[in-house]
Image: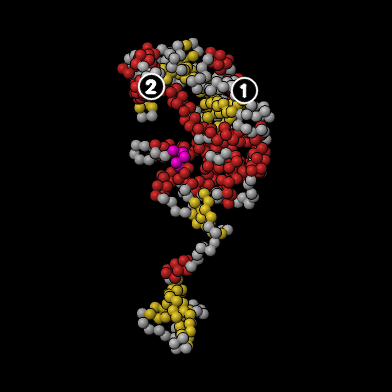
Amino acid sequence: MKTTANHPDWALKHKRPGTELKLINGRYYLYGVKSVYDKTTKRSRKVSLGILGNISREKGFIPSEKAELKKKSGNTYLDKQVMVFEYGFARWLLGELGGNGLLDSLKKHFPGHWEFIVFMVYCRLAFKSPLKNIPTDLERSSMPDLLGWKGKMYDQKVSDMLFEVGGMRQSIHEFMRPADNKRRTVLMDATDIALQSDNIGLSQKGYNSSMDFQPQFVLLYMYDALSLEPLYYRLLPGNIREVSAMNNTIKISGMEDCVFVADKGFFSESNIGELEKSSMRYIIPLRRDNKLIPYGALEKVEQSENYFNFSKRFIFHADTLSLGERKLDLFLDGKLREQEKTDYLRRIKSLPESFSKPKFNDKLQSMGTVAILHNTPLVPGDLYVEYKNRGEIEQYFDHFKNTIGASCSHMQREESLEGWMFINHISMQVIYKLSEILKTTPLNKKQMLIHRYSINDAIEHLKSIKQIKFAPGEFVISEMNKSTKTLLKQMKISIT
């Protein structure tokens, strides 16, 4: 090694106090130095602090990688308060709302409340938050920072703003109303929700599946028949039969080509009569003990050409039975029949007081069957799919129904109830989008992601990505584990 004081100007211009130039094997290097007092020699001596980089005529000073790493490692946050916030799902949700136009629509129709609505939707999806937990859940989230929100959320503010949103009924209607007038087939579904309030006119005693006639309101929903996307909802008093309100809801919503898909408890001559009087199209499953069902038509159905593929198995069906303006289609799911037979035979041994072989013999012809009464032009295969879609609709709603009931059952202001249901409507639209990604993205050559991951699974994987904050403006995004990284890559989701 050779050092020299006769350095060229292009090298000397990079020398600063506390540094030293060295010429080593024909190349210039810049080192950090300091002076320390030596007690032995009783004089100061120079101590090298390590290389800072090299210098060339062409490129000038080039920092050393080791020096840069050492510099970064000196920036410790051990003396600062570290806070961890949910980040992954918040970032994905904002991107999703922005990408499908919902965010712009919220800003247009709710200019003073759109941030609050986003907060509420986020908490409903990420934590299934009841109203009382909204402020706490927001405190552990990066969502306020992502929206640039500088305010404070507390219980009374949540209550007041929800009331204000619910009072903006025209804005809610305009937000949901389709932008075009194109015809679409819409499925209609009604759900009874308990509501113990003397101050809300919607709370009325009425019929429900539990037959307890408790105070309730009816949530009437409209879904796109092909995609199952939630489109429009309306709240009705609990004592109003949904049949009488459907035509008005169709007109109010701006939809046209609507089909009502009922549950098995809906069938009665009076209900069907009301539907037909209103010129409504309907799909109504019948209970298996209904006298209209011609089980004899299935005797040799598996030898016929009447079958179609559904959910990776084949469904057989009898010839459509014409009943005037009505039609009856009877389906046989062989896989379901075998499951029901096995389940019943096992119960003969475990619950002999309720199950017996003679009862099994009586039920055998109806096992694995679905009978549907309708007045649509649908062929059996398409009819079966539209009926089964109702089950998927119920799965979307199941994601919220427990906390919906818990939060609204004791509300005392109708505007608050309206606001809460609007929050849940947008949440269901997001759930639909997430479900579509899982249903249409391949897991492997034979299956889609939905076969391994539920909607909740996907949300939890996104929530596992955290923002670690050391100070205002100083944060890092946590590492992802292998399974989360793999899932998000398959879903084509990038969190940055």
Q: Is residue 295 visible?
A: yes
Q: Amino acid at mark 2?
A: Leu
Mark 2, secondary structure of its residue: loop
The image shows residue 421 at horizontal and vertical percentages of: 59, 34
- Residue 279's place in the image compared with 484, above or below, is above
Q: Residues within 10 Å of mark 2 (few under 14, many from 20)?
A: few
- Residue 418's place in the image compared with 82, above or below, is above
297 sits left or right of 131 in the view? left
113 sits left or right of 25 in the view? right
- Residue 43's place in the image compared with 447, above or below, is below
Magenta-colored span: 454-458
Q: Is residue 220 visible?
A: no
The image shows residue 67 at horizontal and vertical percentages of: 44, 70
- Residue 51's place in the image compared with 280, above or below, is below
Pick the front one: 133 or 356: 356
Q: Which residue is mark 2?
A: 351
> Mark 1 near mark 2, Cβ–Cβ under 8 Å?
no
Q: Which residue is mark 1?
A: 205
Coloring scheme of the render? secondary structure
Q: Residues within 10 Å of mark 1 (few under 14, many from 20)?
A: some
Q: Residue at x 46, y 86 (%)?
A: 39
